[in-house]
Amino acid sequence: MNRVRCMALVVAPIALAGVMADAIWMPVATFPAWLAVGAAWLGWPLGSMALMLVHALTGGRWGEILHPALRAGIATLPLGLPALGGIMLGARYLYPWLHPDRAMPLANSFYLNMPAALTRAGIYVVAWGALGLICLRGRGLERVAPAGLIVLGFTSGFAAIDLTESFDPHFSSSAYGLVASAGAVLLAFAIGIMLEAARASTAELRDLARLLLGLTVLWAYLDFMQFLIVWQSNLPVEAAWYGPRLRGGWGVVALCIVGLHFILPFVLLALPRLQGLRPVIVAVAGLLVGMEAVRNFWLVLPACLPAQVALPVLLSLAFFGSGSVFLAFRPGIQEPFVASKPEQRDVHV
């Protein structure tokens, strides 16, 4: 593992240097690629925090099994600084609301402006950093969990609106933040299964498979309801958001998301005979991880030419992937779950 971490330490700065060079040469393609990969990666630490806080309230074997993987996911949170920093630096290449001379007048301009966006980004960094430290510390987590889940829910939902929904400042969806949060939790749970399924018993693996099925259905329900409401209302402003994402090659990607992000995993996870088969469950978890990344590409990249974004996407993936390996697998992070014991008081007779 030390050798892998050393390789990751070499790859990460090289990939970051490549992204920076590409940003100077072709910023119009590089910053959307950075946003797509960064938004996809961000789901891992945020979803891991949500799952750890939920387990602190509810308990259960699933949290004990996934505890090392959840800690590993939270440990990658420092990558959020370059992720958000790069997005802020390239904001004028990403968001039309920063160009009022070329955009229609916005009723929500009080929210969509650079000072407000920087303020919210600072709030996200402080809130996520504090929750990450509390989760990694682990002591007294059940007392912090209720407030922590509320803070995490609001900040992750608004971050999804800021990062990807505001690509079209005229599109609005009350379910957008919920869809993104459900996807983040599903992503973190699937990565946890991939990392920890080897040490789970057959009975524990069945529990993990059923929970993964429930999270998959929850994400699909929220995403489908958003699409159904937009289709039923048939408003030009909302339909225009789906237009470029359902035409041409991106329409094929949308069908793949439906089939490989929901239908196939649902069928495989719903069959009782397959729930105890470790290779099947790990493969389904890997498929869900890959499709969550593809879905973020589908949200961000339809306005870009595939030939232009291919290289910056690969470089961004190399940076976040190698950086995550280096941070997640450092010594002391993947500790096994230790149940907290009630405090004992000395009794004098």
Image (spheres, rainbow, N blue to C red):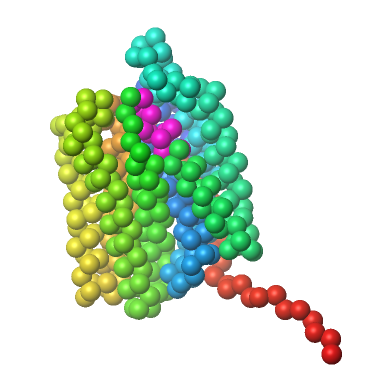
The answer to which of 128 and 85 lies nearer the viewer is 128
The answer to which of 124 and 148 lies nearer the viewer is 148
Q: Position of residue 126 (x, y in %)?
A: 60, 41
The answer to which of 104 and 229 lies nearer the viewer is 229
Query: Is 166 placed left or right of 4 in the picture?
Result: left
Q: Position of residue 280 (x, y in %)?
A: 26, 67
State the residue at coordinates (61%, 52%): 133
Give the residues drawn in magenta, as a range.
159-169
State the residue at coordinates (16%, 40%): 252
Q: Quadrant of the C terminus?
A: bottom right
Query: Is 8 placed left or right of 222 in the picture?
Result: right
Q: Looking at the image, can residue 263 be seen?
A: yes
Q: Position of residue 152 (x, y in %)?
A: 51, 48
**Is residue 167 inside the magenta stretch?**
yes
State the residue at coordinates (23%, 74%): 272
Rendered position, 189 above or below 152: below
Rendered position, 1 above or below 184: below
- Find the residue positioned furthest to the right: 349
Magenta part mainly helix, strand or loop? helix
- Find the residue positioned furthest to the front: 233
Q: Position of residue 186 (x, y in %)?
A: 36, 55
State the residue at coordinates (51%, 53%): 149
Rendered position, 97 above or below 178: above
Question: Quadrant of the rendered structure where residue 212 is?
Answer: bottom left
| Total residue callouts | 0
Question: Quadrant of the rendered structure where residue 124 is?
Answer: top right
Q: Looking at the image, can residue 4 be seen?
A: no
The answer to which of 272 and 113 lies nearer the viewer is 113
